[in-house]
Amino acid sequence: MQRIIVSLFIAFFSLTVHAAKPQKVPAAADPAVSKSTNALDPAWQEIEKKVIAIVGQKGQRTIVDIAYAEVGADACPGLKIDGKAFNESFDALIADPEHKRSPEQQRALEHQSMAYIGVYVGLLLSESFGDRDRFCKEVDVVKTTKAGPSKFWTAK
């Protein structure tokens, strides 16, 4: 069931972003390097606190990496999301052997995690509209790290 939800999210995201894509495509800074210093900073900070409270610092980083990878794959040529890597990371994110959860609590964690991936996608899109070339150059740099968002990309 969880893999179906994740696959549906990927399909929905791809359809939504492609259908609503403006003339200029996203141009975001790599969130692993720096966050914007603009009006969205309070949103980044607030969401970061909320997500860390739910999944911890490492989980928050995974959620941001997934969101960045999604935006990068949509905006830049030659990239697509590696569904297997996405599923494995998402499964690891929500699997927390230290916390015993009821099935309802586990579903709530899955839904919250997916929702916050969407929130981060929205923040990245909001910050990045305008300069596709710059964004894709930054994605090229991130690709060379073989960590963070780059683990979710494969060549088309």
Image (tube, rainbow, N blue to C red):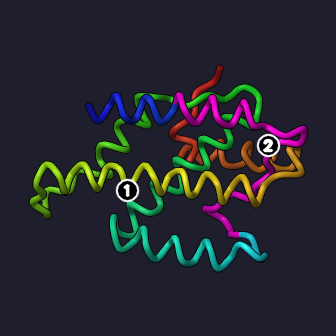
Determine which quarter of the picture holds residue 16: top right
Magenta-colored stretch includes residue 82: no
Viewer-nearest of discs 2 and 1: 1
Residue at 39 percent across and 63 percent down: it is 58
What is the three-letter code of the residue carrying label 1?
Gln
Q: Are marks 2 and 1 in contact (CB under 8 Å)?
A: no
Q: Residue furthest top?
A: 156
Which image quarter holds the N terminus?
top left
Indicate whether 99 appears above or below 53.
Answer: above
List x then y, in percent, for residue 109. 29, 55
Magenta-colored stretch includes residue 32: yes
Question: Quick one: SS at disc 2?
Answer: helix
List x then y, in percent, for residue 31. 64, 61
* N-term-proximal mark, 2 vs 1: 1
Residue that numbered label 2 is attached to: 136
How many discs mark residues in the rendered view? 2
Question: Quick one: SS at disc 1?
Answer: helix
List x then y, in percent, for residue 21. 78, 37
Q: Give the crowd class for mark 2: few <14, some 14-19, many >=20 residues within 10 Å.
A: many
**Considering depth in this image, is 143 or 31 the residue closer to the camera?**
31
Determine which quarter of the picture holds residue 5: top left
Q: What is the span of residues highlighted in magenta in the rendered image?
A: 11-35
**Considering depth in this image, is 139 or 122 the residue closer to the camera?**
122
Residue at 74 percent across and 70 percent down: it is 36
List x then y, in percent, for residue 22. 84, 40
Q: Is residue 59 left or right of residue 38?
A: left
Q: Is residue 14 left or right of residue 108?
A: right
Indicate whether 74 appears above or below 149.
Answer: above
Q: Is residue 113 left or right of residue 15?
A: left
Residue that numbered label 1 is attached to: 112
Q: Give the crowd class for mark 1: few <14, some 14-19, many >=20 residues within 10 Å.
A: some
What is the three-letter code of the residue carrying label 2?
Cys
